[in-house]
Amino acid sequence: MGRVPALDEPLKKHLGPATAKVLAEALDLHTVGDLLHHYPRRYTERGELTTLSELPLDEHVTVVAQVADARVHTFNGAKGRTQRLEVTLTDGYGRLQLVFFGNGVHKPHHDLLPGTRAMFSGKVSLFNRRLQLAHPAYELLRGDGDVAVDTWAGALIPIYPATTKMESWKIAKAVDSVLPFAAEAVDPLPGTLREGRGLAGLPEALTLIHRPRTKADVAAARDRLKWDEAFVLQVALARRRHADTQLPAVPRRPAADGLLTAFDAKLPFTLTEGQNKVSEEIFDDLATDHPMHRLLQGEVGSGKTMVALRAMLAVVDAGGQAAMLAPTEVLAQQHHRSVTEMMGELAEGGMLGGADQGTKVVLLTGSMGAAARRQALLDLVTGEAGIVIGTHALIEDKVGFHDLGLVVVDEQHRFGVEQRDALRGKGKQPPHLLVMTATPIPRTVAMTVFGDLETSVLDQLPAGRSPIASHVVPAADKPHFLARAWERVREEVEGGHQAYVVCPRIGDEEDRKKAAKRKPSAEDDAEKRPPLAVLDVAEQLRAGPLAGLRIAALHGRMHPDDKDEVMRRFAAGDLDVLVATTVIEVGVNVPNATAMVIMDADRFGVSQLHQLRGRVGRGSAPGLCLLVTEMPEASPARQRLGAVAATLDGFELSRIDLEQRREGDVLGQAQSGARSSLRVLTVIDDEEVIAAAREEATALVLADPDLEAHPGLRTALDALLSEEREEYLEKG
């Protein structure tokens, strides 16, 4: 049996068991390689002080600062007289307070004298309108000869992503113990690529990122490590694209005078230039003998459904069937309604009054009655139905197709890969795949997250769409602004229009049970109230500012028939105001709805707010979106809302959203920044690196699909693609 490579050895072999345990539990670092790839977040110079005025509230931070003052206060507590040590730090401009409680508290902290410099680590909180760290850990920085400082060789001190159980300087000492093993790191980049781009070797880059002597060392290390992340990821995606080209598929070419031609002839409007261009890209893909894998992204209301429907009709023309997978029953029903309305008699194939070249369009959801469900399943297996629109109910084992030729997935981010894969597996040969999203994705994100899909973008709005004015309503600072918001809703209704009110929570019995079970944590802010709820707000509006208007509630836990009934009444104009959760976020199309009030808007993400806002302004009258929040003006949440109010450009907003949330795990299913598989690469800032890595990866995989000549790269790929991610990539 061969020796375990040094970077695969467990940390407990080289560190104390207690340290190894904390690194594993708190930071998910288990091996020498894990720790070597846990890079510093930033660096501070030994003589430099951290800017204290810019510390983020409620986050764990490490700061380098100087003690300005230290005082012990004695006060009467619950258990008699108690002491509190207050230490004031300064950076020459701002101040930060440290607080330690307990009798004799000054004895263990006797070294915090005015003028002392140290690294302090803790969670930033607000007390009496002042920033403070309660019981922070700290490490003194005495001077050049001090042993503690010399462990951070040279002038730059690395500040690591840390936790309350493992401070930055303790991580630095652990790194020191394993840094010699960096020399054994297997380099994934081919030598020719490294030399051609002037990149450092991996062992050198790992040493420089952890123990740089100059800022140039940091830059060289980061340049190299960015390439590792971009290139290995792009090789994984390039191999997936290459594998796709080897699969067989049935080419689907629309008939010359078939269903698609008949549909186009009856359209009451002209397609936009963008819709025509994207449709041609899709038709070209459908005509090939390997499966189409295309991402269709576009602004809210840019006409993606029309493009998808024309693709489905082309496949039906060619003798196949098309399935559209929607994330919710409300959206599936909405799509079914709009598709059948757009097609008219063409959606009644085989029925009395239906067009000769028509087909049947069926709906399949989990809540359908047994008889309707049986008929829909029969229509699919016999081929009577050319188009089916449904929820995850389409994926069930008993659902069979006569000849599935195209799968359209709406709002891709709502579906697990397994669900998409199960539907694609229902074709006799792999069907073509069209993925739609109304969340605009910057080019670099598309290259990174959807690198195995060809991308089409719709960035024109169809003629007749109206602009949407957006405003932030600071309900806590200026309560009269909220009163005015309800007046504006009433004015819109009096003008013959309708309005949405969106809340983050339902407020039903299930919500109350969850709240009762939840144990409050020590970190809970007593002042934080639960998010506003649909059922409560609807009741308050009926009794208060919108009394006399026709108001209904809509949320995801209602019976499907009740949901459909409410949506039908709203679409028909029988309701004035719809108070809803984000169940209306995508696909809901009521042109007469002109106003939207989003309560607790700070509880929603940037892209989600943009999606919600897209439900108004869908007719000829201008739209209005009011973002209600109680967050203070200087908070990041208010800045986020200000950005949404300032632009209708979804691509610009998606950049802002990404900069704030980071990329998420670009290969795995977790899409939040906390689990990013990217450590130094940022998909917004490193566009050139990603594009260049994609070119290099494509060329390499074309020449050597199995990476036989690149064992180091194969090893890195295996490390990146854990079993779960490998499966994700294989299916996605």
Image: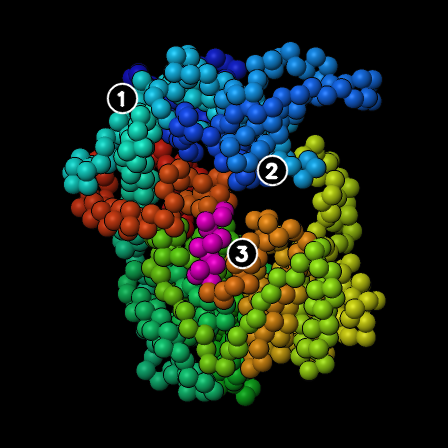
* Range drawn in magenta: 650-661
Question: CB of mark 2 within 8 Å of CB of mark 3?
Answer: no
Q: Position of residue 215 (x, y in %)?
A: 31, 32
Say how the picture is coloured.
rainbow
In the rendering, which numbered label is found on residue 183? 1
- Indicate the amino acid at tag 2: Asp
Residue, disc 2: 58
**Disc 1 element:** helix
**Three-letter amino acid code at the position of disc 1:** Ala
Q: CA distance from mark 1 to mark 3?
A: 44 Å
The relative height of residue 57 versus residue 339 in the rendered view (above or below) is above
From the image, state whether disc 2 or disc 1 is nearer to you.
Answer: 2
Nearest the camera: 373 or 719?
719
Q: Tell whether 536 sits left or right of 502.
A: right
First in sequence: mark 1 vs mark 3: 1
- What residue is rendered at 39% in x and 20% in y? 152
Residue 374 in view in this figure: no
Type of amino acid under label 3:
Val
Residue for point 31% across, 17% down: 180
Report the Cα–Cα distance between label 2 and label 3: 21 Å
SS under mark 2: loop
Which residue was labeled with disc 3? 606
The reply to whether the C-beta atoms of the residues labelled 1 and 3 are less than 8 Å apart is no
User: In the rendering, at what x and y percent does residue 111 appear?
Assistant: 57, 14
Viewer-closest of 249 and 18:
18
Q: Up-down: is 159 above or below 479?
A: above
In which image quadrant can residue 372 be found? Answer: bottom right
Q: CA distance from mark 2 to mark 1?
A: 39 Å
